[in-house]
Image (cartoon, grey):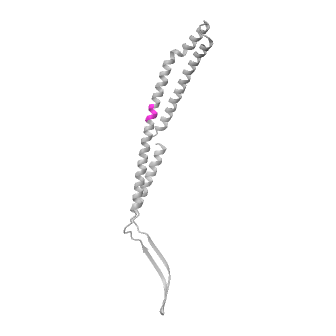
Amino acid sequence: GHPTLLALEADADGAETRARAARRDAWPDVTLGVGRREFEEGGIDADGGLIAIGVEVPLFDRNQGAARAADHESRALRAQASLARSRLQAQAREALRLLEARRAAVLELKRGSAGAHDSLPAIAEAAYDAGEIDVMALIDAHRTELAVANEITALARAARTAYIQLQYLSNI
């Protein structure tokens, strides 16, 4: 159902139809002529109507070249469609693996930071209130928490992007 594949397969079907039409083109071309003819030579004077019929007899060329060319075009388009299908399937497999890896990374990062998420700033604030650390250490604790949250968000976004790409490619 992918648009690229549908286009290539439609082109291949058209080439097959052209090949069948070229093989059926067995009727010779017929030419019909009507006119007037006058003849004057050595005292003979004649005139009259003329009807001419011409028929092509295909002795050597029976339109085999056009049929073969259309057959080859059809095969080439089928090969291109097969190659495109293989590429899209490989891209879909790659997107699936990427999605699984990114999803696992997000879950692992969330699991690892779940306990530290609430405790690091709270511990730093308690230590600051007790006078054990200075303002810079408190700010570093909050920056660390923010960095972890930003990394989780970035990985979740990358996983979502991989999921969308997988959905797009799954129409193969």
Q: Is residue 37 above or below residue 135?
A: below
Asked whether 96 falls inside the magenta stretch, the response is yes
Please identify the residue farthest to the right as the structure is shown: 135
Name the foreground residue: 146 vs 73.
146
Which region shows up in magenta? 93-97
Q: Magenta-highlighted stretch: main secondary structure? A: helix
- Within the magenta stretch, is there residue 104? no
Q: Position of residue 96 (x, y in %)?
A: 45, 32
Q: Does 40 sit above or below residue 84?
A: below
The residue drawn where x is 42% and y is 53% is 74
Measured as percent of width and height from the top left, residue 35 is found at 50, 80
Q: Residue at x 46, y 45 (%)?
A: 5
**168 to the left or right of 72:** right
Rendered residue at 46%/31% (across/down): 98
Rendered image quadrant of residue 141 = top right
The one of 114 and 145 positioned closer to us in this rendering = 145
Report x, y in % for residue 167: 48, 35
- Vertical arrangement, residue 133 with respect to residue 31, above or below: above
Residue 14 quadrant: bottom left
Q: Residue at x 43, y 57 (%)?
A: 18
> In the rendering, at what x and y percent does residue 33 appear?
48, 76
Residue extending furthest bottom? 43
